């Protein structure tokens, strides 16, 4: 089959975003408006995305130094945090950076003297995916060990299987990567929180970005679960509001291993671009598409499948493909700290969100002067807004112990929670694959929810 039809590069008709998304055309942060000059990397396929302005690497805001004062309140029950993150299953590639982020946060907390005078303990358990019952078994084990909070799961579908079990036990569930909009209105007794923004934002960004790249029609291959269908709905709404049309959408289920039917049906609609809303099934889907003439510059991916494919595909297979990941780009100093925790780390997706989750739980416990889950939950919103800015546990807990109100801003960007436990503002990073089938940052978009 020949390549998908050519389209003339154009400036897409963009409607005003109700979320207030503002493009930050930066390599690693900044505030300038992206240039309207089109890049040439995708011209052969008719897709020509706006070129980002040339800027330097972003830096992390400075933290307050000095000695951390001792806690005036000590707890008889040390803070115990569990993690429910994937080491097996279709999102296993996200486990290492998330676990490293948690471990880095816990290390820095304990290096500063811990919470309420006691070291914090962390217990890691595998979440698996929705094909197994691993998450329920792991949750039962964590609750049995008396955790006050559980960081995870990564998958929205997995979280749906355990959220009632966790929150029903009076324990905080804090996900660094759940993006399904369903959790915003979940009856969680105020105990479910997340540092990843709802897919309402990622969908807006991806849908509009494909339009700015000149695509007038889009086909989608979508995982049939809470994550996949929810994100697809928001991508479609944004793309069509920008003047485009979704001409094909094919679903598949977790556990499926054959995708030829979905690929053939989408290609038959001859879309300008294809959005892959999947997990690691992209390893099977991408070769099917490129083998039938789809150019990598026509492929747009999402956080569920943005991974290093250097060992999976021939060089150049994904060169020019792009995708989105919620959160700001991992800064160099943060990467160095993560590599000290896990020297084998190659992916940093959701590491910042996981690090921030650990810090926010610890700071809320300090603010509550309690390690009880319900008391921690009652302080999470307060430590994220309205006070003196700080971005590490030592700097923030110093302010708290000196009687100050704090506003924690983290490695994932500004963290300000709604009453529902959602971030009210966040970055979405846009990345592009290189010849080695790994991706590099292109620019960030900032949005408010």
Image: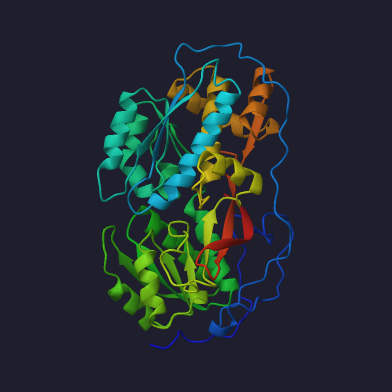
Q: Which residue occupies the extreme front position in the image?
A: 343
Q: Which residue occupies the extreme bottom position in the image?
A: 2
In x, y percent, where is residue 258? 26, 69
In x, y percent, where is residue 389? 70, 34
Q: Is residue 363 above or below residue 240?
A: above
Q: How many marks?
A: 0
Viewer-proximal residue among 217 and 146? 146
Answer yes or no: is residue 363 visible.
Answer: no
Q: In this image, 54 relative to 345: left or right?
A: right
Which quadrant would the N terminus be assigned to in this image? bottom left
In x, y percent, where is residue 25? 69, 62
Answer yes or no: is residue 164 visible.
Answer: yes
Q: Residue at x 59, y 74 (%)?
A: 213
Q: Residue at x 49, y 40 (%)?
A: 100
Q: Is residue 174 above or below residue 197?
A: above
Q: Is residue 139 above or below residue 311?
A: above
| Colour setup of the view | rainbow
The quadrant in which residue 440 appears is: bottom right
The quadrant in which residue 231 appears is: bottom left
In x, y percent, where is residue 275? 45, 69
Q: Is residue 95 above or below residue 289?
A: above
Viewer-proximal residue among 93 and 252? 93
């Amino acid at each position: 089959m020949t390549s998908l039809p050519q389209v003339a590069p154009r400036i897409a008709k963009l409607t005003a975003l109700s979320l207030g998304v503002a493009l930050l055309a930066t390599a690693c942060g900044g505030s300038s408006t992206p240039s309207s000059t089109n890049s040439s990397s995708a011209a052969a396929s008719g897709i020509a995305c706006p070129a980002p302005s040339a800027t330097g690497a972003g830096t992390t805001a400075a933290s307050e130094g000095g000695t951390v004062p001792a806690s005036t309140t000590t707890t008889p029950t040390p803070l115990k945090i569990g993690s429910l993150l994937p080491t097996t299953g279709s999102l296993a590639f996200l486990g290492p950076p998330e676990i490293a982020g948690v471990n880095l946060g816990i290390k820095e907390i304990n290096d500063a003297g811990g919470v309420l005078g006691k070291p914090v303990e962390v217990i890691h358990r595998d979440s698996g995916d929705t094909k197994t019952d691993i998450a329920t078994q792991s949750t039962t084990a964590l609750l049995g060990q008396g955790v006050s909070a559980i960081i995870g799961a990564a998958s929205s579908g997995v979280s749906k299987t355990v959220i009632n079990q966790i929150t029903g036990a009076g324990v905080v569930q804090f996900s660094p990567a759940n993006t399904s909009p369903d959790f915003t209105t979940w009856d969680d007794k105020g105990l479910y929180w997340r540092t990843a923004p709802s897919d309402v934002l990622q969908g807006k960004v991806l849908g509009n970005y494909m339009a700015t790249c000149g695509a007038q029609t889009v086909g989608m291959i979508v995982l049939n679960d809470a994550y996949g269908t929810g994100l697809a709905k928001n991508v479609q709404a944004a793309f069509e509001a920008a003047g485009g049309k979704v001409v094909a959408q094919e679903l598949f289920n977790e556990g499926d291993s054959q995708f030829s039917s979905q690929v053939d049906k989408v290609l038959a609609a001859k879309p300008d671009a294809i959005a892959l809303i999947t997990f690691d099934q992209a390893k099977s889907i991408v070769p099917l598409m490129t083998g039938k003439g789809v150019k990598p510059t026509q492929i747009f991916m999402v956080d569920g499948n943005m991974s290093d494919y250097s060992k999976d595909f021939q060089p150049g297979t994904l060169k020019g493909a792009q995708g989105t990941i919620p959160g700001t780009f991992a800064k160099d100093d943060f990467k160095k700290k993560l590599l000290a925790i896990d020297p084998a780390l190659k992916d940093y997706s959701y590491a910042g969100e996981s690090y921030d989750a650990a810090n926010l739980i610890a700071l809320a416990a300090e603010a509550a002067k309690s390690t009880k889950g319900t008391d921690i939950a009652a302080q999470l919103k307060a430590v994220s807004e309205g006070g003196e800015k700080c971005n590490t546990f030592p700097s923030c807990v110093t302010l708290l112990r000196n009687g100050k109100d704090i506003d924690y801003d983290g490695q994932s960007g500004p963290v300000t929670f709604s009453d529902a436990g959602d971030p009210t503002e966040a970055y979405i990073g846009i990345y592009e694959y290189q010849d080695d089938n790994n991706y590099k940052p292109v620019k960030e978009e900032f949005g408010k929810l």
